[in-house]
Amino acid sequence: MANLAQLRQLEDLHAFFAVDKPAGLPFSSIIKAIKRKFNLVKVSHGGALDAAASGLVVVLVNDANKFVGDVMGADREYTGTIRLGVKSNTNDLQGELVETHASCDFSQERLDAAAKEWRGDIFQTEPRFCAVRREGTAAYEIADTGEHKPFLSHVYRFDVKPREGGRSLAFSLTGTKGVLPRVLAHDFGQSLGCGAVLETLRRVRVGKFNVEDAYPFEKILEMDAQGFMECAIPLAKALL
């Protein structure tokens, strides 16, 4: 437990924290746990991340919240895997599989051609079905969120390559705020003509923040107040 001096230091702590979220944990649970453990008042995040995904969550403490718009609007980078030959109602493996295809062209030439179609300015439409948290529990259920309107986003880089065995592809993606990797996986599968879903996802960068500099969430829960303050990223350093 923090002593009185440390509590005062935490009150005056204005900083960012790079947290490595494990897959399967709601990002909101990270914010709540950090706020509660270190008795913080103003805590927010720099962009949501699906519960099934792992990777970087940027946490903003006290006056860092003044710059939440800058972090929210920053470009993002992801890595992960895409499974070919299937479609689901959520565009990922969290939902119900609605279609399967026995054959698919795995040639690198065909994959590169299809990936090229989804670089630059693209329109995406969020699927009407998605995993939502059941109120009052940590469980998720698939919910019908209704029809969504297409929106414009930009993909700077989208590269794919086959993995050994199975029908999975490894991918890397860099895009603007709002790019939906699971929608991109679906649209990429449409271009191939065999369908695809997002299999795994890891966020590795948000603006200037990188997951390589992040602390695993489990380690943060083991820290005392002094250790937590030592892993803070000061405003001056983060905003340079």
Image (cartoon, rainbow, N blue to C red):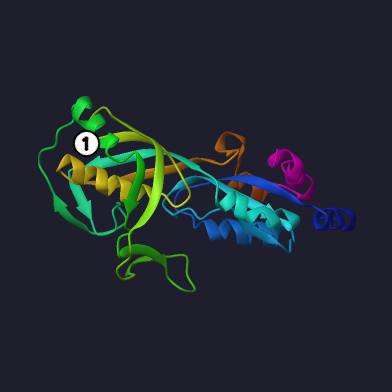
Q: Position of residue 227 (x, y in %)?
A: 75, 44
Q: Position of residue 130 (x, y in %)?
A: 34, 62
Residues 113 and 105: in front is: 113
Q: Position of residue 235 (x, y in %)?
A: 74, 45
* Label 1 sits on residue: 167
Report whether residue 197 is seen: no
SS type, badge 1 = loop
Dot 1 amino acid type: Arg
Tell me the quarter of the image containing the C terminus. top right
Q: Position of residue 199 (x, y in %)?
A: 32, 45
Direction bottom: furthest residue: 135
Report whether residue 37 is seen: yes
Residue 230 is one of the magenta-drawn residues: yes
Residue 237 is one of the magenta-drawn residues: yes
Q: Quadrant of residue 189?
A: top left
Q: Is residue 183 left or right of residue 15?
A: left
Residues 169 and 76: in front is: 76
What residue is shown at x 71% (from left), y 62% (from top)?
42
Residues 74 and 35: in front is: 74
What residue is shown at x 77% (from left), y 52% (from top)?
14
Total marks shown come to: 1
Q: Quadrant of residue 94?
A: bottom left
Depicted 236 relative to depicted 144: above or below: above
What residue is shown at x 52% (from left), y 56% (from top)?
27
Q: Is residue 221 left or right of residue 161?
A: right
Direction left: furthest residue: 102
Tell me the quarter of the image containing the N terminus. bottom right
Query: In the rendered structure, which segment of residues is drawn in magenta?
Result: 223-240
Q: Residues within 10 Å of mark 1 (few under 14, many from 20)?
A: some
Q: Is residue 111 left or right of residue 217?
A: left
